[in-house]
Amino acid sequence: DQQVKQNSPSLSVQEGRISILNCDYTNSMFDYFLWYKKYPAEGPTFLISISSIKDKNEDGRFTVFLNKSAKHLSLHIVPSQPGDSAVYFCAASATYTDKLIFGTGTRLQVFP
Amino acid sequence: EPEVTQTPSHQVTQMGQEVILRCVPISNHLYFYWYRQILGQKVEFLVSFYNNEISEKSEIFDDQFSVERPDGSNFTLKIRSTKLEDSAMYFCASRKASYEQYFGPGTRLTVT
């Protein structure tokens, strides 16, 4: 089941710079997308979401962009901080289902 | 800030034994979920529960699995006869009417 893909397993960014995490999906029925952050031995923490009727949603340092024609979304973190170092998962949902479909995750490391 | 809690944090059991994983969802949430993550793999949906009944379940959620909301606060996942391949992190999640699901810290289940 590869409906949601995160093709970069890891990303390393310097503190203060922008982190861009990418996610692609194949199911055109998905209409809601979420980003979660996960530290080791903890559960996923909700960060930000976007509905398919929008192309951008912003919350503080986090912005999610959605390109429906390309079936692509991205999470921008500006400025990146060492505390942002974690695994980031994108997830998708559709109105016909109650479940979240997760990507494989991208490990972000923010170094000083 | 209200959180989803899960107990125990780690459960070790022998193959063939029954286990019950416990969750206390956020108090005003209406929808409840179980997910699991096998080491190195994606977070996978198991089951969703609403209005005291299962609303959706995955292929993984076979007759060996059951869920229950025995009172107004707890939500449990029972595995009747555990197998080695049931070893995973099990996450409980809950949500209100919006799409954002909030996850607990997880229970690490080790089947020996």
Image: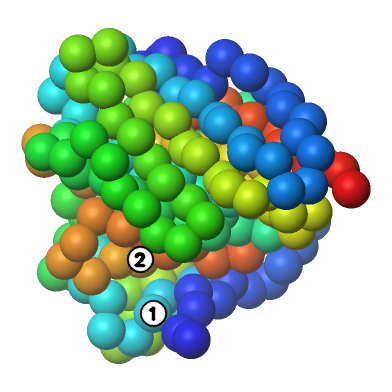
Q: Quadrant of residue A59?
A: bottom left
For label 1, count other residues whose C-alpha is less than 10 Å away and answer few (under 14), some (14-19) or many (20+). Answer: many
For the question of whether residue B94 can be seen, the reply is: yes
Which residue appears at 86% of the width and 43% of the height? A111
Which disc, if any, is residue B94? 2
Q: Earlier in the sequence, mark 2 or mark 1?
A: 1
**What chain letter is assigned to the residue under label 2?**
B
Which residue appears at 56% of the width and 45% of the height? A77
Colouring convention used in this rendered image of the protein: rainbow
Contact? badges 2 and 1 (CB < 8 Å): yes
Which secondary structure lies at badge 1? loop
Q: Where B69 sits versus A18, above or below?
A: below
Q: Where B92 sits versus B17, above or below?
A: below
Circle 1 sits on which residue? B26
Q: Where A48 sits versus A21, above or below?
A: below
**What chain letter is assigned to the residue under label 1?**
B
Amino acid of disc 2: Ser
Q: Quadrant of residue B70?
A: bottom left
For the question of whether residue B83 can be seen, the reply is: no
For label 2, count other residues whose C-alpha is less than 10 Å away and answer few (under 14), some (14-19) or many (20+). Answer: many
Which disc, if any, is residue B54? none
Amino acid of disc 1: Ile
Question: Residue A80 in the image: x percent, y percent?
Answer: 68, 48
Q: Quadrant of residue B53?
A: bottom left
Question: Residue B49 in the image: x percent, y percent?
Answer: 25, 59
Which secondary structure lies at badge 2? strand
Is B38 situated left or right of B79 in this image?
Answer: right
